[in-house]
Image (cartoon, helix red, strand yellow):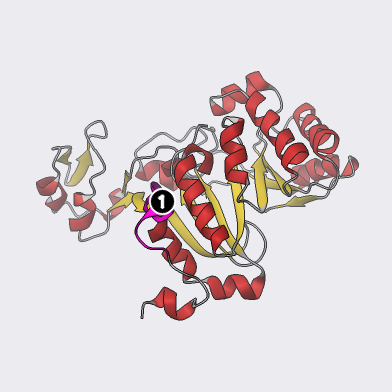
Amino acid sequence: MDRAAAIAPSLTVPGPGGLAATRGSVFNVQRYSIHDGPGIRTTVFLKKCSLTCLWCQNPESQQEAPELFFDADKCAGCGRCQSVCPEGAITMRDGRSWTDRSRCTGAGHCAEVCPQGARSLMGRYLSAGEVFREIAEDSIFYEQSGGGVTLSGGDPLAQPEFALALLRLCKQAGLHTTLDTCGYAAWPTVRQLLEHVDLVLFDLKHMDSNRHRQLTGVGNEPILRNVRKIHRELRRPLRIRFAVIPGHNDEIANVEATADFVAGELGRSVPVDLLPFHRFGEAKYQRLQRPDPLAGFVPPDPAQLAGIQAVFQSRGLSAHLGG
């Protein structure tokens, strides 16, 4: 008997066909998560996102294809990676390996043979059934804590067929589902997915569309339109998430406009999570050998966060630091 069947006898692991065969790109399945919805959860991080936020803390999630992580400090210069690269993308420079990213296809052979663990592949293509098997292993924790499954990313809306298959499998098993999204997609796509979602964690970046485009690569019109429809038409439970990025979206005019939008368009019963910028993504940019747009950036201080929290609370909203 496999572990999933032994631990979670109440869940039926699907066979290889149907929904379970739908494939998608995943870069992490985080178990025992307590910040992505109620209770103890499994958070499935899907690769690919329609936005390119300057402050993205998961740059490895922006593209769908698997990507190479390289930790230069661990490289011993043995050359094994060079010998197995099918694209000839790896050369040796100053006693360490170097990768031509324009030629790398993410095959992952170099990561398989690296004895020091300097190379790893971020992302793998899995079937919805394979992901569900991992989810099923922890169902006892969901039952005891009121938890469930959260799809995050990247953004699940950027892989809608795969996200839909996962959500349907989870709902068929009676699991609580949460969608963590920036909301950038056509409304029919959003609506179809949310038929199988119990809670939406919805990111708001900036209320001015031109500034939003400068910061994320896209305007905010479809995002604001979708969150209104989620609340008014689907009446799905919402939590708004607002990342506080000093010098980019923390100006008082934007904070007040965001608070006014939530209170006026969504209602004062919708809670807000204020998420302060942190520097955990810096090492990821280094391992992707990609420049970090906010390298060395200073996170907001407690006094500033308290002031922003007070703005939201002054509108009658429940605003929390962290999520």
Residue 163 on image: x %, y %: 49, 47
Question: Residue at the top extreme?
Answer: 210
Q: Nearer the viewer, residue 245 or 106?
A: 106
Which residue shows up at 25% across the image and 30% down it?
A: 102
Residue in the foreground of this view, choosing between 161 and 246: 161
Q: Is residue 11 left or right of residue 313?
A: left
* Residue 220 appears anywhere in the view: no
| Membership of 108 in magenta stretch | no
Report x, y in % for residue 13.
43, 67
Magenta extent: 14-27
- Residue type beneath disc 1: Phe
Which residue carries the number 1 mark? 27
Secondary element at tag 1: strand
Q: Up-down: is 198 above or below 186?
A: below
Could you tell whether 141 is left or right of 315 in the image?
Answer: left
Residue located farthest toward the front when viewing the structure as drawn: 18
Residue at screen point 65% across, 66% down: 39
Residue 295 rendering spot, x and y as whole percentages: 49, 37
Residue 12 shows in the view = yes
Which quarter of the image is occupied by the N terminus?
bottom left
Position of residue 171 relative to residue 268, above or below, is below
Q: Residues within 10 Å of mark 1 (few under 14, many from 20)?
A: many
Number of numbered tags placed on the structure image: 1
Q: Is residue 24 magenta?
A: yes
Q: Position of residue 290 (x, y in %)?
A: 38, 35
Q: Residue at x 40, y 59 (%)?
A: 129
Q: Quadrant of residue 304?
A: top right
169 or 201, nearer to the observer: 169
